[in-house]
Image (tube, grey):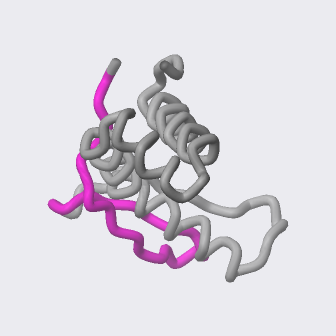
Amino acid sequence: MSTYTPGPWHKSNTKCGGYIFSDSLSVNIAEVFNLSGFGTRGEDDANARLIAAAPELLEALENMLEAFSPDIYRMTAAQFGKAGEAEIASQNARTAIAKAKGEEPK
C-alpha cells in the first residue's frame, strides 16, 4: 500500500471557487472544484475542511485504538452499561482506518 502525504494539510481557495490542498511544505496535494452546481458554498466549505482534516482524523483514530486495549474498552464501557456501544465504536474506527488506508477491515 502506498502512503499518503503526511499532515497537516491546508486548504486555500482558488480564483475559480474551488480549493487547493497543500502539505506543510506548501506542495499541492489536490485541487477540488464543484462543477456540478449542486450544493451550497457553506456545504463546499464544510467538505473542504473535512478533507483538510483527514490526516489528523486518521491519526487520532489510530492513537485512540492504540491507547486503549480491548479489555479497557470492555471494562470501562461495562461500568457505564455501554459495552455493546463501545465495541461498535471501536469496530467503526477500525473500519474507517482500513478504508482510509485502502485495506480490508480487521
Residue 28 placement (x, y as % from top left): 32, 55
Residue 51 magenta-drawn?
no
Q: Is the magenta stretch mostly helix, strand or loop?
A: loop
Q: In this view, does 84 lie to the left or right of 53?
A: right
Relative image position of residue 76 (x, y in whole percent): 42, 51
| Quadrant for the N terminus in the image | top left
Q: Nearest the camera: 50 or 105?
A: 105
19 sits to left or right of 17: left
- Between 86 and 61, the one lying in front of the other is 86
What range of the chain is rendered magenta? 2-25
Residue drawn at the location 48% of the way across and 19% of the way down: 106
User: Where is residue 37 drawn, in percent x and y?
Assistant: 82, 67
Instruction: Look at the image and say whether residue 3 sits in the magenta stretch.
Output: yes
Q: Residue at x 45, y 36 (%)?
A: 97
Q: Nearer the viewer, residue 100 or 65?
A: 65
Q: Nearer the viewer, residue 100 or 87?
A: 87
In the picture, residue 54 is in which quadrant? Answer: bottom left
Residue 79 vs 84, above or below: the answer is below
Q: Is residue 98 above or below residue 66?
A: above
